Image (tube, helix red, strand yellow):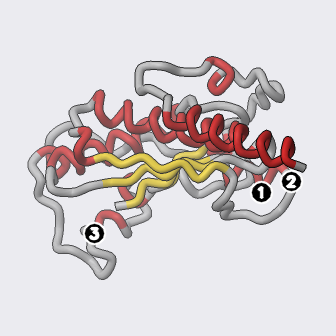
Amino acid sequence: MKLTKTLAIVAMISALTLAGCSSDDEKDASLTDGSLNGASGMNDASVNGLGDGSGMNGSGMGGGGRYGNGKYGAKGANGLPPEFSDPNNPLSKRTIYFMLDSSQVQQDFVSVISAHARYLLANPSQHIVLEGNADERGSREYNIALAEQRSKTVAGMLKAQGVSESQLGIVSYGEEKPVAMGHDESSWELNRRVELAY
């Protein structure tokens, strides 16, 4: 009994230590290469009619214009400008989906992240929290690490476009906050995501 409690405590400390030791510069290859369960080869944005990113071509995303000069409309009921409610505006897309066992951003979502980067650059007092999530497959520890890496990947893309690190927060929920409760691929693909929370 005493040995079981000791092992449980050691396991918890190890998991917490591993979660706290990650670095922006280091990437665990097992989190990004699809080696755990084999890459599915599926683009989550184009399967089962996901609304975020499917058919996204970046139209209306040219440099300058209202994105480059900070002229966003009046704040809406949720505290964000009306552009965030316009389904034709990439700012309305605030969920980035990922493939199985991957933290690589799919091409469909690059323009969405770029639009949010331009908004954050034009509004330096605005902050965003990148909420990483994973599906239920894999251990709890693996899913927390993978979800964190997904958030860090999106944060890295935002920072590469000039967004200040002080505007960004990273949270990893792992498998703890699913949006779809099923135990099938259509549910899992909705749960592999980073949500951009302003």
Q: Are marks 3 and 2 in contact (CB under 8 Å)?
A: no
- Which quadrant of the figure has residue 12? top right
Residue depicted at 43% across the width and 49% down the height: 130
Q: Name the element at disc 1.
A: helix
Image quarter hosting the C terminus: bottom left
Mark 1, Cα crowd under 10 Å, few <14 / some 14-19 / many 20+, is some
**Left or right of residue 135: residue 95:** left
Q: Extreme right residue here? A: 1
* Residue ID for mark 2: 184
Task: Say which mark, if any, is on residue 7.
Answer: none
Q: CA distance from mark 2 to mark 1?
A: 6 Å
- Which quadrant of the figure has residue 79? bottom left
Q: Nearer the viewer, residue 186 or 128?
A: 128
Residue depicted at 26% across the width and 55% down the height: 127
Q: Name the element at disc 3.
A: loop
Residue depicted at 68% across the width and 21% down the height: 30
Q: x, y (%) of residue 183?
A: 86, 57
**Amino acid type, label 1:** Ser
Q: x, y (%) of residue 40?
A: 79, 31
**Left or right of residue 62: residue 12:** right
Let me know if residue 120 appears in the view. Answer: yes
Q: Nearer the viewer, residue 12 or 114?
A: 12
Mark 2, Cα crowd under 10 Å, few <14 / some 14-19 / many 20+, is few
**Amino acid type, label 3:** Leu
Task: Say which mark, if any, is on residue 80.
Answer: 3
Q: CA distance from mark 3 to mark 1?
A: 29 Å
Sequence-first disc among 3 and 1: 3
Task: Say which mark, if any, is on residue 187.
Answer: 1
Q: x, y (%) of residue 124?
A: 15, 50
Q: Name the element at disc 2.
A: loop
Q: Extreme bottom residue here? A: 77
